[in-house]
Image (tube, grey):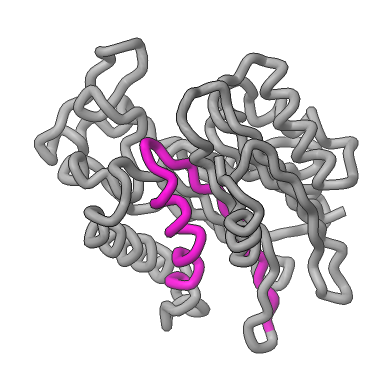
Amino acid sequence: MTGGGDILHKIKAKSCFSSSSDTEKGSSTMAKKNITHGFHLVKGKSHHAMEDYMVARFKQVDENELGLFAIFDGHLSSDIPDYLCAHLFENILNEPDFWTETEKAIKRAYRITDTKILEKATDFERGGSTAVTAILINGIKLVVANVGDSRAVICKNGVAKQLSVDHEPSKERENIESRGGFVSNLPGDVARVDGQLAVARAFGDKSLKEHLSSVPDVSMEMIDEGTEFFILGSDGLWVVMSNQEAVDCIKEIKDPQVAAKHLAEEALSRKSRDDISCVVVRFC
């Protein structure tokens, strides 16, 4: 958990949040769009410090407005998700092909960011981080990318649609084994890369990197009249709730900050023990 008011202020100043419980909301400045967002983070029952970080803000780029939203779920590390907060979107937007070949630009930025993290491995704690990022372009186009098991779900006409891919080791066994690694359910009952990590893709994790990927899956979704909201959530939310359950849980709540807090509280009531982070962005 982040300690000290000065440290927390510095984290918030760069749109990165990490504490035992943080909540906030904001809105778009586009005159013709009523787009609002809120978030809530709760530390789980584990004995380690809070390892979830997030971004939720709007940024003006020339004549365009970008909504930048992300959740970074660290494992055995808080330095790496903190670094991702500060640098990943910067690297994406610095890509010269961002506006013309967006998917290619995002994949390149993810790779560059992971390379820089690995180069700094001696400065960081061991471990790594998953990531789910969402870029809302002028309120009409949503671009989602992810590595790991944090998830993006959009609600259109009351129906949940998953926009990200859960990178589970059991689903990527062939790729992991082709790199010389293995997938084992021991110890425990969860499939893990080399018996250690429960996701097949992540930033960092230098000791496992030969057997892991940091290549994101990227999807694009147009925002139409039927689009109500989308959710970004760490796996502490999704381990106890299905996509449709999460959508149904907040579909009547118009305030996105209240909705995000309600989602986290519902996950806690369902006995989720992991850190829980969620961002809700509403379009109506």
- At 27% from the left and 13% from the top, the residue drawn is 187
* Image location of residue 254, percent across then percent down: 90, 45
* Image location of residue 167, percent across then percent down: 39, 37
Q: In this view of the protein, which residue sits in the foreground, 111 or 101?
A: 111
Q: In this view of the protein, which residue sits in the foreground, 101 or 40?
A: 40
Horizontal relation, residue 27 to residue 221: left or right: right
Is residue 104 within the magenta segment?
A: no
**Boundaries of the magenta span:** 64-92
Q: In this view of the protein, which residue sits in the foreground, 205 or 36?
A: 205
- At 58% from the left and 51% from the top, the residue drawn is 54
- At 81% from the left and 39% from the top, the residue drawn is 259
Q: Residue furthest left?
A: 180
Question: Where is the N terminus found, in terms of image quarters?
Answer: top right
* Image location of residue 56, percent across then percent down: 66, 58
Q: Is residue 163 visible?
A: no
Q: Is residue 203 above or below residue 140?
A: above
